[in-house]
Amino acid sequence: MLPKTRFDPDLEEQERRCSMDGEYWPDTSEFFYKYHQGPRAGKTMSMCKACYDERRNARRALARQQQELVAECCLKATGQLCGDMEIDDHESLLTY
């Protein structure tokens, strides 16, 4: 197993391995986000910014698609859009 951090003598700085892509990047705020609260406050996250942003954007897109699907199913089933956008409340209407 690869170490989470290593020292790069050429750059003379600490590097951190991204938990998603496995690449080493300088352990700085340019490449890694930091936790802002809780027991890890001030510490570097395990995913690099690029992977974190990619995952966040994919999750947001999926949530948007689910909301659109629920709205479409409500419209087809009842003829009107309902205000409740929770996917679990509409399982009987959804056909995949």
Image (spheres, rainbow, N blue to C red):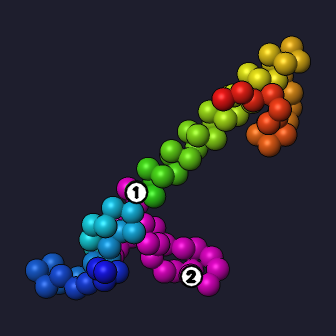
Residue 39 visible somewhere in the drawing? yes
Q: Residue 42: percent from the left, percent from the top? A: 51, 80
Q: Is residue 46 left or right of residue 60?
A: left
Taking the magenta stretch, the answer to whether it contains residue 94 is no
Q: Residue 50: percent from the left, percent from the top? A: 38, 56
Q: Which residue is mark 2?
A: 40
The tag on residue 2 is none
Check disc 2 and report its element: helix, strand or loop: loop
Q: Which one is nearer the viewer's eye here, 14 or 81?
A: 81
From the viewer's perspective, is the residue at label 1 or at label 2 nearer? 1
Looking at the rendered structure, the kind of residue marked 1 is Cys
Q: Is residue 37 above or below residue 91?
A: below
Looking at the rendered structure, the kind of residue marked 2 is Arg
Q: Is residue 33 above or below residue 3?
A: above
Q: Quadrant of the N terminus?
A: bottom left
Per the rendered image, the range of residues in magenta is 27-50
Residue 82, quarter of picture: top right
Q: Are discs 1 and 2 less than 8 Å apart at CB?
A: no
Residue at image location 63% in from the left, 36% down from the top:
64
Residue at image location 13% in from the left, 85% down from the top:
9
Q: Earlier in the sequence, mark 1 or mark 2?
A: 2
Q: Which residue is mark 1?
A: 51
Q: Residues within 10 Å of mark 2 (few under 14, many from 20)?
A: few
